[in-house]
Amino acid sequence: ASENNELSGQLELLEQEKCDLNKEDEVSKQSNQSTVEELLAQIVHLRRCLETETHRKQDYARDHCKVVKEMKEKNRKLSKELVDMGKRETRLKIAKDRMTREH
């Protein structure tokens, strides 16, 4: 009977240990699930950040090309104006020389 009680006590301890292990296992599974969900949320966040940065770079490149194109066009116009002003200056000098010679 004493051995029976001892075995019964050991069985009770083993059952309690099993119960504790099951609880730990459940807590561990929940913790792992939370960690996985947090990591997935971080991945989604980082993907959005990457997309935003990619769009920002594309916008910058597009804007930069537009600015360069506008600057080239402005440079072309100013160069043409400079040439036109040079021609006008030459015509004015010729006219001035003629007027000076005539008087």
Image (cartoon, rainbow, N blue to C red):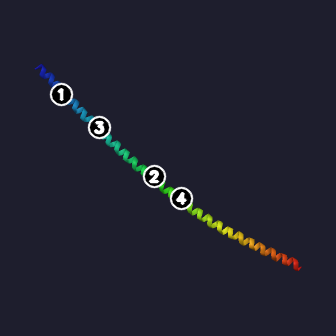
Residue that carries the numbered disc 2 in the rendered image: 50
- CA gap, disc 2 and disc 1: 56 Å
Q: Amino acid at mark 4?
A: Ala
Residue that carries the numbered disc 4 in the rendered image: 61
Quarter where residue 81 is shown: bottom right
Quarter where residue 64 is shown: bottom right
Give percent across and percent down for residue 70: 60, 65
Residue that carries the numbered disc 3 in the rendered image: 27
57, 25: nearer the viewer: 57
Tag 4 secondary structure: helix
Q: Is residue 30 above or below residue 1?
A: below
N-term-proximal mark, 4 vs 3: 3
- CA gap, disc 2 and disc 3: 34 Å
Q: Which of the image's four quarters has the N terminus?
A: top left
- CA gap, disc 1 and disc 4: 73 Å
- CA gap, disc 2 and disc 4: 16 Å
Give percent across and percent down for residue 55: 48, 57
N-term-proximal mark, 2 vs 3: 3
Judged by depth in the image, the label closer to the viewer, 2 or 1, is 2
Disc on res. 12 = 1
Q: Is residue 51 above or below residue 14?
A: below
Left or right, 56 with reference to 38: right
46, 12: nearer the viewer: 46
Question: Crowding near pointer 4: few (<14 within 10 Å), some, many (20+)?
Answer: few
Residue drawn where x is 15% and y is 25% of the image: 8
Disc on res. 25 = none
Q: Which of the image's four quarters has the C terminus?
A: bottom right
Left or right, 5 with reference to 48: left
Q: Is residue 4 above or below residue 34?
A: above
Question: Crowding near pointer 1: few (<14 within 10 Å), some, many (20+)?
Answer: few
